[in-house]
Image (cartoon, rainbow, N blue to C red):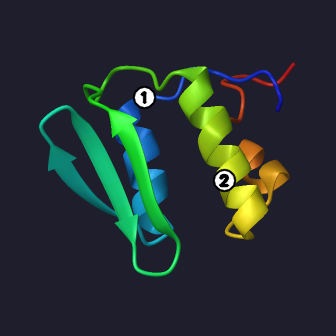
Amino acid sequence: MTKSRPVPFAEFRSFLQKLGYVEKRVPKGRVFEHPEEGLLLFRYYRDDEPVFPRDLIRTRKFFDLRGVIEAGEFDTTLLRADTLA
C-alpha cells in the first residue's frame, strides 16, 4: 500500500456506495451490505474523521481477495496523495 493522505469517512462511504454497498447504522458502528459481496463492519466514524489505516488496509485486502477491485486500483482511487511528489 502506498503512502497516502488521510481519507475522511464521508469520502470512504461514497467510495463504498459506488461499489454497490448500502450503509446501515448500528448502535456501535456502521455496517455496509452488498447483496453479493457480503458485509463490512466499521466502528462509528464522524463524516470528517479520517478512517483508521487498519480499516483501509482490511478493506483493500478484502476487495482484492474477493476480486471486487484490485489493490492497485483501490490505492489509485481512494488513497491517492494530495499533491504529486
Q: On screen, 67 above or below 16?
A: below
Image quadrant where residue 33 sits: bottom left
The answer to whether any part of residue 77 appears in the image is no
Image check: 12 left or right of 27? Answer: right
Question: Looking at the image, which residue sits at the far bottom?
Answer: 36
Q: Residue 8, labelled with which disc?
A: 1
Q: Secondary structure at mark 2?
A: helix
Give the crowd class for mark 2: few <14, some 14-19, many >=20 residues within 10 Å. some
Image check: 4 left or right of 44? Answer: right
Residue pictured at 83% horizontal, 28% vertical? 2
Along the line of sight, the residue nearer the viewer: 75 or 84? 75
| Nearest-to-viewer mark from 2 and 1 | 2
The x, y position of residue 38, in whole percent, is 46, 68
- What is the C-alpha distance between the residues marked 2 and 1? 20 Å
Give the crowd class for mark 1: few <14, some 14-19, many >=20 residues within 10 Å. some
Q: Amino acid at mark 2?
A: Phe
Q: Residue 62, labelled with which disc?
A: 2
Q: Secondary structure at mark 1?
A: loop
Q: Earlier in the sequence, mark 2 or mark 1?
A: 1
The x, y position of residue 1, in whole percent, is 82, 32
Residue pictured at 71% horizontal, 67% vertical? 66
The x, y position of residue 75, in whole percent, is 75, 43
Q: On screen, 83 above or below 78?
A: above
Q: Amino acid at mark 1?
A: Pro
The x, y position of residue 44, in whole percent, is 26, 29
